[in-house]
Image (cartoon, rainbow, N blue to C red):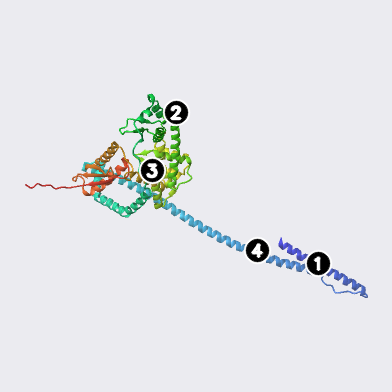
Amino acid sequence: MAIMDVFKDQSNKRRGQRNQSSNQDFSNRSKKVVVSVGRQNPRPQPPQDYQSSREIIQDARDEAFRIKKAVEEEAAKIRQESLELEKRIAQKEETIYSKLSQLENSEKEIERYKQALTKKEQEIETLRDNLIKELEKVGSLTREEAKKLILENLESHLKDDVAKKIKEAEEEIKATSQQKAKDIIANAMIAGATDWVAEYTVSTVKLESDEMKGRIIGKEGRNIRAFELATGVDVELDSEIPNEVRLSSFDPIRREVARIALEMLVKDARIQPTRIEQLVQKAKQMVQSDMSEAGRRAAQSLGLYNLPQEALDTLGRLKFRYSYGQNQLIAAVETGSIAKKLAEELGAKMIVCATGGLFHDIGKTQVDKEGTHVELGVELAKKWNFPKAIIDCIAQHHEDEPFTSIESIVVHLSDAVSGARPGARHEPVEEYIKRLGNIEKVATSFSGVEKAYAIQAGREIRVIVKPDIIDDSSIVKLAHDIREKLEKELTYPGQIMVTVIRETRAVDIAK
C-alpha cells in the first residue's frame, strides 16, 4: 500500500506538471497566432505528455525492482534463520532422546541390582537362621538364653566403666554447681526468714478461777450447749491444767472464733444464751476482719498490690491453718519470699514467682470441698482471673503436672526449701516411724544389701552391703539405683542422702 501511495503521488505530481506545461503551450500558441503573419509549417516535435509518461513508467520499474530486491533479501534472511532454528531443534531432540535412553538403561540396571540385593538378603537371612539353629544345637541354649548370657557378660565387663563414669559425672557436677547452688539457696533462705515460729498447741482460754467453769456450763448445761451450737466447737472443761478451758475443732477458724467469744464472755461475766449468740457474732466479724488484714499484709510484704479482695480474704484464712505443725500463712509468705529471691538470681519473672509462691497452697482453705488442695487452688486462681503463668505455678508445685516454665520450677523448689528447713514442720510419731520404715524397706529390697538404717530424721539412709556379693565398683551404681527408687516410690520432705558402705574384715585369734 505504501508503494502504491508513492506511485500515486508521483503520478499526480507529473500530471500537474503536464497540465501546467500544456497551459503554457496553449498560451504561447495563442500569442503566436496573434503575431504570426502568413502561414507557417513548424518542425514536428514529440508531445511532452508522451515523454512524461515514459519517465513515470521507468521510475516505477526502478522502484519495483528495488522493492523486489529488498523483499527477496529479507525472505532469504528469514529462510536462513528458519534453517538454523530447525537445525538447533533437531540437535536438542537428538540430545533428549539420548538422555532418555541412558535413563531407561540406568533404571533397568538399578532394578537388576535391587533384585540381586533382595536375593542376597534372603540368602543371608536363611543362612543366619541356619547358623542360629546349629548354634542352639551345639550350645544347648535357646536364642533368648544366649542373648541373656551375652548381655550378662557385657554388663559384667562394663560394670567398672559404668561405675567410673557415674562417679566422674557426679564429681564434675558437684565441683561446678555445689558452691553456686549453696550461695543461691542461702540467699533465698535469708530472704525468706520469718520473725516468729509456728504454733503447735490447740486453742486454750485461761480462767480466773475454776468457779467460772460452772458459769460457763450454766443451769442444766444450757450455756455450754448454746456456746457449742453457735461456734461449732467442743468445749473441754476437764483439762489437767487448772483454770484452763480447751477448745477443739477440725476447723481452725471456728476454734479462733470460739476462743475470742469465750474470752469476751469471761470478761463480760454475763453468760447466757442470748449474750453468747451476740458475742459469737461479734467474734466472727473480728476474725473475718483479722483474716482480711492478714492477707493484705502478707501480699504487701512481698510487694504485691492490686490483688482481688476476695483473694486476700481467702489468703488470710491460712493464718488459722496448720500443716505438720507449720502455720500455712507464714509458710506461704516464706515460700513467696524464697521464690522471689530465686527468681532474681535466675533471671525469672519475680512477680509471677512471688504470687505463685504466696498462693501455692491456697486450696487448703477449702476444707468443705472435695479434691486435692492443688485442684482446689487451681479452681480458685481461675475464678480470680489470675494469669496462666501463676495458675501453672499452683498446679505444678507438687509435680502433679510437668513443668511448663522456669517460674513453676522456682515455686516448686521454694516450697521444698520452706518445708525442709529444720524446725519448720513436725509430724506425729506414728507417721514418722512409718516413713523411716518405708525408706529402709526400699533400700533392703535390692540384692546384696545386708542392712539399712534411716538416720537424721529420715534425711539420710546408710546401706551396708555384703562384700562377697557387691564389689567396690558396684556400690556406686547401687547408690544410684536406690536414689532413683526412693524418688519414684516415696513422698518425703527435703532430700535423702544415700550412703552405701562395703566393709571387708579379716579376723584371726591368737592362742
Q: What residue is shown with label 4?
A: 71
Of mark 2 and mark 1, the one earlier in the sequence is: 1
Assess disc 3: are there few (<14), some (14-19) or many (≥20) residues with their C-alpha within 10 Å of its C-alpha: many
**Nearer the N terminus, badge 3 or badge 1?**
1
Could you say whether the residue bearing mark 2 is in a helix, strand or loop?
Answer: helix
Out of 253 and 276, give the one closest to the viewer: 276
Label 4 to label 1: alpha-carbon separation: 32 Å
211 or 195: nearer the viewer? 211
Sequence-wise, the earlier of marks 4 and 3 is 4
Q: Do the CB atoms of the residues marked 2 and 4 lie less than 8 Å apart? A: no
Residue 312 in sight here: yes
Q: Tell me the residue at 55%/59% (across/down).
A: 86
- Horizontal placement of 406 versus 61: left or right? left
**Amino acid type at mark 3:** Ile
Confirm or deny contact between disc 4 and disc 3 (CB under 8 A): no
Separation of residues labelled 4 and 3 (CA atoms): 108 Å
Q: Which mark is residue 380?
A: none
Earlier-in-chain disc, 2 versus 3: 2
